[in-house]
Image (spheres, rainbow, N blue to C red):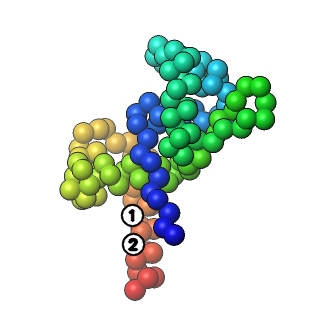
Amino acid sequence: MSKSPPAKPTESELEILQVLWQHGPSTVRFVNDYLSEKREIGYTTTLKLLQLMLDKGLVLRDDDSKTHVYRAAVRQEETQGLLLDRFLDATFGGSALKMVMQALGNRSTSQEELNQIRHLLDEIENQNDSAQ
């Protein structure tokens, strides 16, 4: 039996997942209050989004207490990887080089960031050498 790929979260669902990843299991009220600090969003909208996310398998709900507590059912790293792969394919034809060149060309990159990129490239190179 093959495992179906995780659902791709919408932008609003991704905002909610960010709250759950950062703060852990949370009530609808907490998620709504947190999101309301950035933009106007109604409680019932947040509740409906969480219910849809539950149906999609993006969150889990604890029904034990009077107030339902939701937690992320998908890991942050896996979701970021899935979204990045889709973005890379759709926007840059699958070319990581084109994406990196665009990202570095459009922003001011600090020396510390460049050092971290060099370190990452060295690690990838070493992994490739040891795999051969």
Q: Residue lying farthest right? A: 65
Which numbered marker is on residue 125?
2
Q: Quadrant of residue 119?
A: bottom left
**Mark 1 vs mark 2, CA separation in Å:** 6 Å
The one nearer the camera, 8 or 20, is 8
Query: Which residue is rendered at x = 20% and y = 56% of the image?
Result: 93
Query: In the image, what residue type sits under mark 2?
Result: Glu
Which numbered marker is on residue 28?
none
85 relative to 47 in the view: left or right: left
78 relative to 33 in the view: left or right: left
| Residue indicated by mark 1 | 121
Q: Is residue 114 visible?
A: no
Dot 2 crowding, Cα within 10 Å, few <14, some 14–19, many 20+: few
Query: In the image, what residue type sits under mark 1?
Result: Leu
Dot 1 crowding, Cα within 10 Å, few <14, some 14–19, many 20+: few
Query: Which residue is rendered at x = 23% and y = 48% of the image?
Result: 91
Query: What is the x, y in percent for residue 73?
Result: 59, 47
Q: Is residue 27 visible?
A: yes
Tell me whether circle 1 and circle 2 mark residues in contact (CB < 8 Å): yes
Query: What is the x, y in percent for residue 2?
Result: 48, 67
Query: Which residue is rendered at x = 45% and y = 82% of the image?
Result: 130
Kind of element beneath mark 1: helix
21 relative to 9 in the view: left or right: right
Check the image and report above or below for 122 versus 92: below
